[in-house]
Image (cartoon, rainbow, N blue to C red):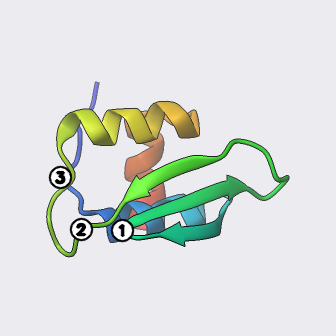
Amino acid sequence: MNRLPRLNGRQVLQALRHGGFDLSHVRGSHHYLRRHDGTGLMVVPVHGNRTLPAGTLNSVLRQAGLTIEELHRLWRE
């Protein structure tokens, strides 16, 4: 099993957009995304260049239905 990468919110947003998610709207520092087919609303906090805590990143991955390996692949694209 791969380790959870240390990413900030912008990096996670970039990876998720490569993975088929579109930005729905932004409310403060929280970016809301949906899949291209319009399902699965999820939230990614973006607080400048601060690294997302491991629990928050795990929650984002769970909401997106992605594994750590898939996140690594999307982030490198």
Q: Earlier in the sequence, mark 2 or mark 3?
A: 3
- Counting residues from the N terminus, which is met first, the one under dot 2 or under dot 1? 1
Q: Secondary structure at mark 1?
A: loop
Q: Residues within 10 Å of mark 1 (few under 14, many from 20)?
A: few
Question: Exactly how many numbered labels are in the figure?
Answer: 3
Report the Cα–Cα distance between label 1 and label 3: 19 Å
Q: Secondary structure at mark 3?
A: loop
Give the left or right position of residue 69, taking residue 56 as reference: right
Identify the residue position indicated by label 2 in the image.
47
Residue 60: x, y in percent?
43, 41
Is residue 34 in view?
yes
At 56% from the left and 59% from the top, the residue drawn is 32
**Quick one: SS at disc 2?**
loop
Question: Residue 55: x, y in percent?
Answer: 24, 33
**Residue closer to the observer: 67 or 73:** 67
Q: Amino acid at mark 2?
A: His
Residue at the (32%, 66%) spot, across then down: 46
Q: Is residue 11 above or below residue 16?
A: below
Mark seen at residue 29: 1
Q: Disc 3 designates what residue? A: 6
Q: Residue at x 65, y 46 (%)?
A: 41
The residue depicted at 38 percent of the width and 37 percent of the height is 68
Q: Residue furthest front?
A: 28
Whether residue 3 is visible here, answered yes or no, is: no
In contact (CB < 8 Å): disc 2 and disc 1: yes
Comes first in the chain, label 1 or label 3: 3
Where residue 20 sits, quadrant-wise, is bottom right
